[in-house]
Image (cartoon, rainbow, N blue to C red):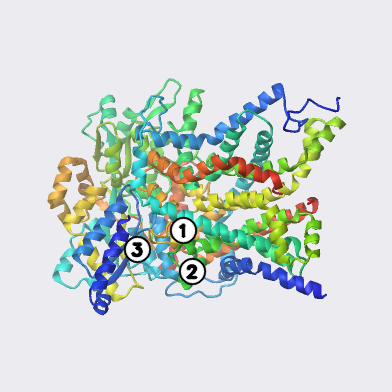
Amino acid sequence: MSAAPHPAPAATRSDPYAPKGLALTLESTGAILLALIWVLPLAYAVWAAFHPAEYTTRFVLTAPLTLDNFTRAWAAAPFARYFLNTFILVTLILVFQIVLGTLAAYALARQDFWGRDVAFVLILAQLMIMPDALIVENYRTLAKLNLIDTIPAIALPYIASAFGIFLLRQTFKTVPKELDDAARVEGASPLQVLMRVYVPLAKPTYVAYGLVSVSYHWNNFLWPLLVTNSVESRPLTVGLQVFSSADQGIDWAVICAATLMTSAPLLVGFLLFQRQFVQSFMRAGIK
Amino acid sequence: MDRREFLGGTAAFAGATALPGIARAQSTELSFFYPVAVGGPITKLIDNYAAGFEKDNPSVKLKPIYAGTYQETIVKALTAHKSGTPPVLSVLLSTDMFTLIDEEAIVPFDDFVKTDEDKKWLASFYPGFMENSQTGGKTWGIPFQRSTVVLYWNKDLFKEAGLDPEKPPKTWAEQVEFAQKLTKRDAAGNTTQWGIQIPSSGFPYWLFQGLSTQAGAILANAAGDKTDYANPGVVEALQYWVDLAQKYKVHPPGIVEWGTTPRDFFEKKVAMMWTTTGNLTNVRANAKFPFGVGVLPAGKKPGSPTGGGNFYLSKKATKAEQEAAFKFVRWITTPERAAQWSADTGYVGVTPAAYETEAMKKYVADFPQAIVARDQLSSAVAELSTHENQRVTKALNDGLQAALTGTKTPQKAMEEAQAEAERILKAYR
Amino acid sequence: MTNRATATIHGWLLLLPAMACLALFTHWPAVASFIESFHSTPKARRPARFIGLDNYQQMLADPIFWKALSNNLWFALGTIPTSIALALLMAVWVNDRIAGRTLVRMAYFTPTILPMIAVANIWLFFYTPQYGLLEQITGLFGARSTNWLGSQDTALYAITIVAIWKEAGFFMIFYLAALQAIPPSLGEAAAIEGASRWTFFRRIQFPLLMPTTLFVLINAVINAFRMVDHIVVMTRGGPDNATTLLLYYIYQVGFGFWDTAYAATLTCVLLALLALVAFVQYGWLERRTHYQ
């Protein structure tokens, strides 16, 4: 077999295992078919949201278009304020998660100290403990702190994230030890080493983790519902819940409109920044 | 700008201009949890009521808090009760009464009923609703957003099947007969249209209570400490439900989803459905064909359960807060407001007087189907409610679903449900 | 030794903020649950008292617990391997230069963005008998009508599929990143050796993806025990507990029955189960996993 495969396009290096011809067609077909299945719920949401209620279950191409469902959804709750609250909430959580996570991950990845393994196990434990199961205790704690019905109350139980710490620890472990040593030789303190060597190299991980964290907290529901009472502190999902009313059966048109409306910032954000996101993942890689 | 903020602003302004000390002493803030079970603009309606009440009672500041579905509302209210500050007033399921009493979360209304006028007010509600609101000689809940199960039918499909579109089935036998005529199958043997549908997901016990009442059985005693699931009448009722699907093949097999049932009806996939009166407004808006609403067909006798939510007063609130909350409950259940609430939401008016008001007469003239719920109240029974309510009803739900999906016979399913309920309730006698 | 002492102080100082939050909002409540599992549920007139292992005995005699446990194991068995395999397949696909890969990638990722509560309602429509989307499609091929969520034989499969849909695209992102990080020189070298594409994948790519697989596996296992949002909307554990999973049952016992001590007991069992799986898994895989 020839050592040099096909001549590479100018910019990229060629991958000898990249499928060509029929294989590529087959693979593309498979990938697109799967993509169609995967996007089906979203596609359906778009269909139901933009058509009158009687067309939610009938897919007639000539069905009239309407924005009524969005008007109804928007009018049902003070969504403008909820958008602001959700935005504040996810930002607050993300900032704290990153600061706390970076410090802890650095300790776990590169400091060799007494009790490190125990600490790691204690942190990993959070991965397995469902916040839902701890609701009553956490509510009690926040009531004692006099924080009920505030945005920090929604955020506090989540700002130390085992998932984030774990992710960052894995990334920090891939940073060549020599870089760390070199900085130390120059007399940098551990914190300075962290800021100068590790944090810049882990930027892609931060972006990736940010995406995950924001998606999760944008959509979290039960806990925010329980700890908040007023319009000033409630996030979008609580407003969204008005539509899944139990007595009346499901009104797909309005649910879909509300879903699109509330997830739109995330969808658009991902669409606009997806190249950056994926490149972030690529560059350092999450391992 | 949000209206509540605006109101808060005016209240603060008013407080600042009045003598501060006096203003503080007189103003009572009243938190009020309510669930949304029928969707739509209910949060707005409640806000309007709150504003109206504050106008009539400037010393009280009412803070309505939308608390999710019924299940989420009780989670929120009891979590706050156990480890924080619970709302002074909440609307929770009438069946939660025993649970709330056992948790010592509520106080009875009797202490606040002092004048003759108060007593008259307390006696003015439909007895069918009060059954779920009173126990041990005390009144723990005041009916607010209440409903009952009724039969909806598609008049067009009745005509097609050669039935009189104005006459719903009156008996169990007629119900089967009509449903047989209304069931359509295609050449391949697939059913394209079902005769009847009784939803069985989530809380099948509620609709089943219609059947069991019609069979002459009572599911639980008034003290809420003994069930009678294995009663022959109960088994007979379940057998009838199972037969609709298995023997007569006029009802979809397996579990029928509550949430999609109205849509099945709109899509003409089913000609008759049993569901709540809370669906009236929804069906009226979305059914593209003439439809009828009728009382449930009778077995040995007519019957249907009531359902929905009551007002409850928190035990942890101060006397002044409870007094203010009581005032609000009285205010919002006056015949005029009860009538308006019924017209706006489709819930049943909670007092006979509500049906005598102009607002209600106008609504009923415009939408005659709305009167059916009232007519049925004479034969309505209390919704199944016991101590450890959700656990005891789950035993029944599981048994019903087991029989409907064919894994147990009705007899065996009900015997097992009864044994489980017995185990749980023994401690309460 | 002083070096190590300094490192210990530094280490714990760095850990302090995260540990304090974890202790307050995770460890303490978990320990409180553990203690509660040996007590009776406090009622207004009957404060909690120590009852030893009674709650655990009640659990062993509770048929719904066993049903939930077995459902959950099947659910785990259904979701974990499938979603990981699909994630890997998706990642390999969008890593190649296929047509429209930006859109394909976006499509795979949409489930992560959409809130489960809303999406569950959409899936409910897909599964609805007679006019649901699935039925409209199978109807074209003349298949018989199926009540996917309303039959004990199919309900668990139906909710398993929703879970796979929800998480495969999320895991794909991690695999994609890892694939991209594999140096192209490895592929070139393997090609010189004349390795087939399958051999290259099995011998080179897959082992290099091991750290990612470990990470994804841990997440998949945990998700298998905590994805219950869709059950609340779609089946509420029915028909007759056919789709009751452990966490859903815990939620029901704790916030429906208000039997908090029994809910704590179930929580402890779930935690023990997860701890066992996770640490065995972690110990086993970390030994086979090499960091650069």
Label 1 crowd bin: few (<14), some (14–19), many (20+), radius 10 Å:
many
What numbered label is drawn on residue A142? 2
Q: Nearer the viewer, residue C173 or C9?
A: C9
Residue A207 placement (x, y as % from top left): 62, 50
* Residue occupying the point 81% across, 57% down: A178
Q: CA distance from mark 1 to mark 2?
A: 13 Å
What numbered label is drawn on residue A28? none
Q: Chain of mark 2?
A: A
Three-letter amino acid code at the position of disc 2: Leu
Say which element carries label 3. Answer: helix
Label 3 crowd bin: few (<14), some (14–19), many (20+), radius 10 Å:
many
Q: Chain of mark 1?
A: A
- Per the image, the residue denoted by label 1 is A224
Q: Nearer the viewer, residue A201 or C204?
A: A201
Q: Nearer the viewer, residue B78 or C115?
A: C115
- Per the image, the residue denoted by label 3 is B97
Is the residue under label 2 in contact with that under label 3 (CB below 8 Å)?
no
Q: Is residue B409 left or right of residue B104?
A: right
* Residue occupying the point 86% across, 31% down: C192
Say which quadrant the N terminus of chain A sits in.
top right
Residue B290 placement (x, y as % from top left): 24, 32
Badges 3 and 2, same chain: no
